[in-house]
Amino acid sequence: MSNTSLSLGNLRAFAIVLVVGFHATLAYVVFKPEPLPLATPPYAWKAFPISDPTQWFGLDVLCAFPYVTLMQLMFFLSGLFVWPSLRRKGTATFVLDRLWRLGVPFILGVAVLMPVAHYPVYAVSALNPTWPDFWNQWLSVPFWHSGPLWFLWVLVAFDLAAAALYRFAPAIGERLAAYAARAADAPGRSFIVFAAAAALAYLPFAAFFRPWDWAQLGPFSFQPSLFAHYAVFFFAGLGIGAGGLETGLLRSDGVLARRWAMWTSVAAVSFVAWMLLTAVTLDDKPLGIGPLPQLNVVVNLVFALTAAATCFAFAGIFLRFATRRWAVADELSKNAYTIYLFHYLFVVWLQYALLALMLPAVVKAVIAFAAALLLSWAASVAAQRLLGHARKFGAALRPS
């Protein structure tokens, strides 16, 4: 395995750890809405399923960074292997594979895992909680909450768009590949283009929607301000992957890796600037009527800059320092997708169980994170083994 592949595998492991840590910590932040019963608008439990009265402001700062950058990194990493997969499998096989691997788990997860995961939201305020009463309340809510599984259907949509591009306009993909290949020795110029595209995709929608606003069509939820922004990160990854991971921008001995400190500094400074500007402009008034509305555009620009710089920073750090194989990281990377599917169930139930314990917020967050990671990892391994046995059993039943 090449150094680049090892680095990206380790980065994938880091990303899933960050996902679990982010969700496990949200119950203990200071700035969160008051908890309300399951069927009571505005349904703040969609973002904060459990609101623990034990809290610490340091966790707000800790959660802010993945809030601004994590999903962009996830979409970027997801796009890296799309074009090579299309070349290898062809359009039809690629689409069927994506629908099976992402679409089916999304349907099953939304139908089964998400109701079970949100039972504690109901139980917190119910006098005599029962599953039938929970189910009645769940069905009375005017949407079917998908939790973090929204990422799967959006990724399917981006994959289908990539497949259509490959089928009907392959020259566009090859141009992206050629540009990405040329960017290997000039990451600074590529970053300017990347950050500008991320900002242009975000600013028009951010004028009408906040980053925490969600739209819902049945089980399909998404952030209106960020949908096109996420697409930029996905297709940036697609272009880099199409141009060659081993010879392009993500070359382990390339300029991006050698200048990791510069990208890390840009990401850190822009993130701090975003937090300070957000603190100045944020209030409870309608969008654009804050105390300093003229800063809204600046805040949104810095938001996009932070996300783009963080992708470059993490890529540079892992290309420079994470080119070794680590057994734990290998297993985490291998199980990252299924851990993502299961982790929210364990996070919410653990936060619910910890409500009764008199412990500091940081201790509760660490317990919820560590236990959720281990339990979802174990569930991932068990599910993959079960699926492997099912495939062998199915193969044995086929006529020879």
Image (tube, rainbow, N blue to C red):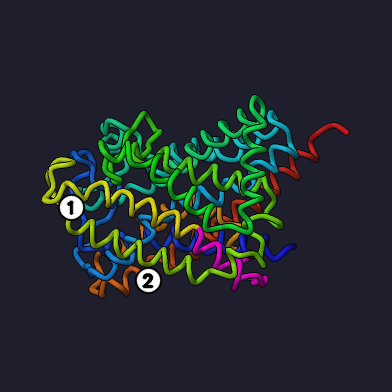
* Among the 4 quarters of the image, the one containing residue 368: bottom left
Q: Is residue 159 or residue 55 the one in the foreground? A: 159
Left/right of residue 33 with respect to residue 25 in the rendered view: left
Q: Residue furthest top?
A: 168
In the picture of the structure, the residue carrying the numbered disc 2 is: 366
Separation of residues labelled 2 and 1 (CA atoms): 29 Å
The numbered mark at residue 119 is none
- In the rendered image, residue 145, in percent from the top left (x then y), is placed at 35, 39
Q: Nearer the viewer, mark 2 or mark 1?
A: 1
Residue at point 75% right, 39% down?
Answer: 88
In the picture of the structure, the residue carrying the numbered disc 1 is: 282
Q: Main secondary structure of the magenta part?
A: helix
Which residue type does callout 1 highlight?
Answer: Leu
Q: Residue furthest right?
A: 400
Which residue type does callout 2 highlight?
Answer: Val
Left/right of residue 295 with respect to residue 383 in the rendered view: left
Q: Quick check: 175 above or below 91?
A: below
Residue at point 31% right, 62% down?
Answer: 353
Q: Quick check: 370 above or below 174?
A: below
Which span of residues is magenta-colored? Answer: 312-330
Q: Is residue 314 or residue 300 the one in the foreground? A: 300
